Image: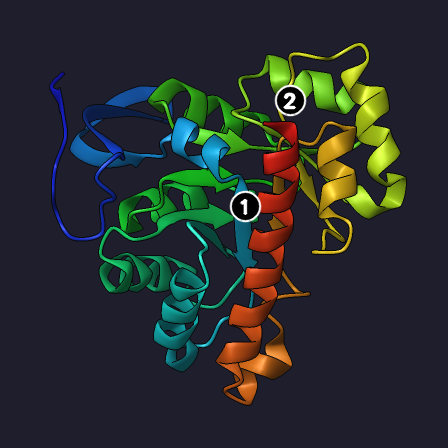
């Protein structure tokens, strides 16, 4: 197996690209699917700016302005959910539009078929609303960063033990920031992604309580803003989150 860096369109300079041989097991037999090029998320880069946007229900006409405004506002990591119509093609096009300026992944990945489609389209990571063993296992085997969702301590620890890059605590607003402090008591080594109800106003509270990364979706990428072409409002909301994170990260330093 060869490993190297590529400068192809859609790749960030610090993304790793692996040529892998994929073996599929069908009906008890083994079929060689051939060499595939898989882009791998740079987790260290994400941890330096741990903000993840979530876009659901994106329309094709909104893709380019949403991507451009998100990048201009300072966002570096974005997931497109697989329950969005034509999600794989949107990921493929987003990669071309971003031209290496944005790390792209797939969200709401619940089936192996969705994972395969997302990776083929250029997704560099997968986010799940819950723990789906077969999806997580394939990601771990291929070195794809995976963020499974969990809520209870048992679920959180099981997801981490399974090989999660970070565990997505979802929905975070159900428990609030103090819950992260309680989780980090016994599970100090775990990396936690707060998702659900994260805003510029409460991001600092989540960070101080122990959250390692922060995801935001419907409150920023609002369907009504996209429908009315109010992309600058999306950019402003992202800027608010970036500013909130910069403030708390400076305090921690």
Residue 88 coordinates in the image, percent (x, y): 37, 57
Per the image, label 2 sits on a secondary structure element best described as: helix
Per the image, label 1 sits on a secondary structure element best described as: strand
Q: Residues within 10 Å of mark 1 (few under 14, many from 20)?
A: many
Q: How many labels does the image show?
A: 2
Judged left or right of residue 32, residue 167 is right
Judged left or right of residue 113, residue 136 is right
| Image quarter of residue 119 | top left
Does 140 appear above or below 122? above
| Image quarter of residue 74 | bottom left
**Nearer to the camera, 211 or 54:** 211
Circle nearer the viewer, 1 or 2? 1
Judged left or right of residue 222, residue 176 is right
Q: In which quarter of the image is the N terminus?
A: top left
Answer yes or no: do the residues labelled 1 and 2 have beta carbons within 8 Å?
no
Does 96 appear above or below 198? below
The residue that appears at 59% across and 81% down in the rendered structure is 225
Residue 105 coordinates in the image, percent (x, y): 42, 46
Which residue does the numbered mark 1 point to in the structure image?
A: 51
Residue 112 coordinates in the image, percent (x, y): 45, 38
The residue that appears at 42% across and 70% down in the rendered structure is 69
Q: Earlier in the sequence, mark 1 or mark 2?
A: 1
Q: Residues within 10 Å of mark 2 (few under 14, many from 20)?
A: many
Q: In which quarter of the image is the C terminus?
A: top right
Which residue does the numbered mark 2 point to in the structure image?
A: 159
Residue 129 coordinates in the image, percent (x, y): 65, 42
Mark 1–mark 2 distance (CA, rounded to whole Å): 20 Å
Does 123 appear above or below 137? below
């Amino acid at each position: 197996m060869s490993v190297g860096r590529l400068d192809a369109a859609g790749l960030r300079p610090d993304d790793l690209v692996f040529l892998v041989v994929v073996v599929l097991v069908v009906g008890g037999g083994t079929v060689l699917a051939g060499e595939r090029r898989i882009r791998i998320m740079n987790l260290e880069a994400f941890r330096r700016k741990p903000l993840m946007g979530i876009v659901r229900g994106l329309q094709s006409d909104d893709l380019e302005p949403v991507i451009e405004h998100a990048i201009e506002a300072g966002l570096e990591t974005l997931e497109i959910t697989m329950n969005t119509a034509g999600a794989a093609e949107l990921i493929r096009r987003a990669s071309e539009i971003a031209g290496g300026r944005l790390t792209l992944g797939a969200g709401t990945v619940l089936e192996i078929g969705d994972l395969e489609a997302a990776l083929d389209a250029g997704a560099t990571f997968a986010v799940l609303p819950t723990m789906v063993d077969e999806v997580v296992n394939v990601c771990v085997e291929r070195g794809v960063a995976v963020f499974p969702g969990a809520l209870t301590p048992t679920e959180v620890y099981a997801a981490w033990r399974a090989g999660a890059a970070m565990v997505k605590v979802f929905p975070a607003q159900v428990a609030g920031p103090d819950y992260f402090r309680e989780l980090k008591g016994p599970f100090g080594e775990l990396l936690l992604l707060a998702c659900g109800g994260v805003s510029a106003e409460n991001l600092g509270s989540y960070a101080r309580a122990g959250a390692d990364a922060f995801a935001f979706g419907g409150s920023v990428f609002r369907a009504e803003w996209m429908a009315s072409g109010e992309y600058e409002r999306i950019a402003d909301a992202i800027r608010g989150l970036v500013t909130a994170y910069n403030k708390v990260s400076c305090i921690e330093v």
